[in-house]
Image (cartoon, helix red, strand yellow):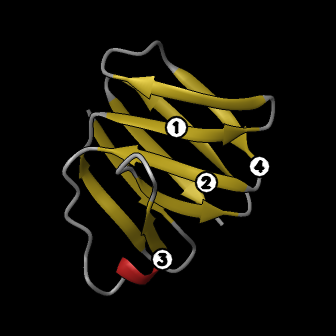
Amino acid sequence: MYLEIVSPEATLFSGEVSSVTVPGVNGEFQMLQNHAPVLSLLQAGDVKIQGDLKIDEDFQHKFTIGNNGETILAISSGTIEMKANKIIVLAD
């Protein structure tokens, strides 16, 4: 599935991933291939991404690698939309 993470400054990442876990306002949830459509607010926490990511070197400092090998982006708030195997995260 395709993930795009957009911040007020720039598009931080865009590319294919295998799963995304986000800090929803009602709790953390994960999306996999063919997940039902979702539109949700996000709270402060970590966006956890699984897959072979190619992150632009200008934005690599914003991401860390977690204990399970996932790529992590800390956010303070945002929104997420998933539809037709495309996820868009608008993150602050």
Sequence-first tag of 2 and 1: 1
Q: Is residue 37 left or right of residue 46?
A: left
Sequence-first tag of 3 and 2: 2
The answer to whether marks 2 and 1 mark residues whose Cβ atoms lie closer than 8 Å is: yes
Quarter of the image where one finds residue 33: top left
* Measured Cα–Cα span from mark 3 to mark 2: 11 Å
Sequence-first tag of 1 and 3: 1
Which residue is label 4 attached to? 43
Name the residue furthest right: 26
**Label 2: how many Cα within 10 Å (few below 14, some 14–19, many 20+):** some
Figure check: 14 above or below 34: below
Which residue is label 2 attached to? 46
Residue at (41% x, 16% y) in the render: 35
Name the residue furthest bottom: 58
Please tell me whether mark 1 sits on a helix, a strand or a loop. Answer: strand
Residue 7, percent from left and from top = 53, 69
* Measured Cα–Cα span from mark 4 to mark 2: 9 Å
Which residue is label 3 attached to? 62
Please tell me whether mark 3 sits on a helix, a strand or a loop. Answer: helix
Which residue is label 1 attached to? 21
